[in-house]
């Protein structure tokens, strides 16, 4: 998309606090011009595969985010929700993503599914490489038409509030059956060939229906629902929050996806149920040999479940590494602040620490370290441009002027 040379930054308010009707109108017009160009790319049909397939940089990864930029073109200016994010999700591993509200965690994961609210939200730069087995997609360039094969089938998502994803008027069984029907192409292969129809038009035979129901019941059993036959016939409102979240997990794993994105999957649940749900998720991940991108505010959850951690701040990755590295030696002042703000059993504190100050306005980001105005460790160099990433070890890196290449070079 970068090749098309769409000027992605043009809409800008002259004064971010006050906008005249004329300015606002000008911005919307300019936004429409830019987003129309992206939408033209997104909606293309019969695009040759070579235009959106690529190679992984490291075959051990299932996903590689590479300099991802996802912007929202709003009437008050361009919101740079994700502004140059780079990290990997290795096969079979869990990568935790932390950072305070609004730092771009959800937009990063939605970009991978191409589910960012369009037309205003667009991936404007960078690559998201996804290894689907037979080919590697660059999701940023993949047309929406092709995304239907990837979503649910190869990558599935578990959201914070299951009621927003479950349809209140259909029974649980019907909803999981539908997911399996839509994605189990091989199950209907013969029927499709016979009918010469697309999968959406195929009515499963009686035998297929029985197979689908058996699979749904198996999924419900797997997520620890004791009376699966009964739950199969229930409506979402008849279940507790924890049970609904189990149903969501059953749906997410029904098609053996290569990657599960769990966006705050347990924040709406109480603590004991949270632990059970997370345990189930981890067990199933290993059973179906999948990877997990786990988005959470809870550093305790990351410490207990993840192999790697990515710390985001204002649309950028400020630190990443193995859980051991980041928890043992947090390097970025923001990560250190997050760790200090964590309540602990053996910590005697009068008042819970909170990082003072606030995140810069996402419409008008400064060209220096975004954490500078809140940073207690700031030095003269911090007035320079946004700091580059410094490798502290082959797996641990940080974007901060307190560290230099020379100090940490391994050769
Ligand atoms: N549809 C939208 N239109 C405009 N801006 C948006 C839209 N969706 C998200 N944003 C902005 O993008 C930024 C990142 O949002 P995102 O939802 O990714 O945050 P988050 O890290 O997931 O936060 P939380 O922890 O609260 O879920 C925020 O500044 C948000 O206001
Ligand atoms: S670059 Fe400077 S201001 Fe930014 S986090 Fe590091 S020390 Fe603080
Ligand atoms: Mg979010």
Image (spheres, grey):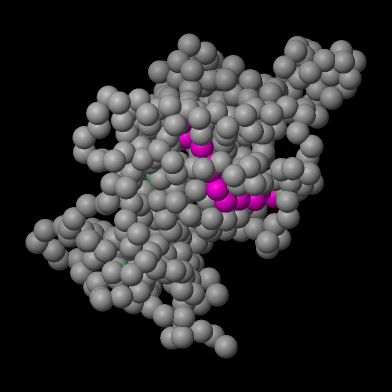
- Residue extent of the magenta highlight: 120-132
Against 111, is 120 above or below? above
Q: Is residue 127 magenta?
A: yes
Against 54, is 60 above or below? below
Q: Quadrant of the C terminus?
A: bottom right
Q: Nearer the viewer, residue 389 or 36?
A: 36
Q: Position of residue 253 (x, y in %)?
A: 61, 37
The residue at 79%/37% (across/down) is 48
The residue at 45%/20% (across/down) is 236
The residue at 40%/38% (across/down) is 11
The residue at 48%/58% (across/down) is 306
Q: Nearer the viewer, residue 320 or 152?
A: 320
Q: Nearer the viewer, residue 166 or 398?
A: 398
The quadrant in which residue 233 appears is top right
Whether residue 391 is visible here, answered yes or no, is yes
Against 70, is 39 above or below? above
Q: Quadrant of the N terminus?
A: top right
Q: Position of residue 359 (x, y in %)?
A: 27, 51
Query: Main SS type for the magenta part?
Result: strand
Residue that lies at the very extreme toward the bottom in this rendered image: 411
Whether residue 279 is visible here, answered yes or no, is no
Q: Is residue 110 left or right of residue 43?
A: left
């Amino acid at each position: 998309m970068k090749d098309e040379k769409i000027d992605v930054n043009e809409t800008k308010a002259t004064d971010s606090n006050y906008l005249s009707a004329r300015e606002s109108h000008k911005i919307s017009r300019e936004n429409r011009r830019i987003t129309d160009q992206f939408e033209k790319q997104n909606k293309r049909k019969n695009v040759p595969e070579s235009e959106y397939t690529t190679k992984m940089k490291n075959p051990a990864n299932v996903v590689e985010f590479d300099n991802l930029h996802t912007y929202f073109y709003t009437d008050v200016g361009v919101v740079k929700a994700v502004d140059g994010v780079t990290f990997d999700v290795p096969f079979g591993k869990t990568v935790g993503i932390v950072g305070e509200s609004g730092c771009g965690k959800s937009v990063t994961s939605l970009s991978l599914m191409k589910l960012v609210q369009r037309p205003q939200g667009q991936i404007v730069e960078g690559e998201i490489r996804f290894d689907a087995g037979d080919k590697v997609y660059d999701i940023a360039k993949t047309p929406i038409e092709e995304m239907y094969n990837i979503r649910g089938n190869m990558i599935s998502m578990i959201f914070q509030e299951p009621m927003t994803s479950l349809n209140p008027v259909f029974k649980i069984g019907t909803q999981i059956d539908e997911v399996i029907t839509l994605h189990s192409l091989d199950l209907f292969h013969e029927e499709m060939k016979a009918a010469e129809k697309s999968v959406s038009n195929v009515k499963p035979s009686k035998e297929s229906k029985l197979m689908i129901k058996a699979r749904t019941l198996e999924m419900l059993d797997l997520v620890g629902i004791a009376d699966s036959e009964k739950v199969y016939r229930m409506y979402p409102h008849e279940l507790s929050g924890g049970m609904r979240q189990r149903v969501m997990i059953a749906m997410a794993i029904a098609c053996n996806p290569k990657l599960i994105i769990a966006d705050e999957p347990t924040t709406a649940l109480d603590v004991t149920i949270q632990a059970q749900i997370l345990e189930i998720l981890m067990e199933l991940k290993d059973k179906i040999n999948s990877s997990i991108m786990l988005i959470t505010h809870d550093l305790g959850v990351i410490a207990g479940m993840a192999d790697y951690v990515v710390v985001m701040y204002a649309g950028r990755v400020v630190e990443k590494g193995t859980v051991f590295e980041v928890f043992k030696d947090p390097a970025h002042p923001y990560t250190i602040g997050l760790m200090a703000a964590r309540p602990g059993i053996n910590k005697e504190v009068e008042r819970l620490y909170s990082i003072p100050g606030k995140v810069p306005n996402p419409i008008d980001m400064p060209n220096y370290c975004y954490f500078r105005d809140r940073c207690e460790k700031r030095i003269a160099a911090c007035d320079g441009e946004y700091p580059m990433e410094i490798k502290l070890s082959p797996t641990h890196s940080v974007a901060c002027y307190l560290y230099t290449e020379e100090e940490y070079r391994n050769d």
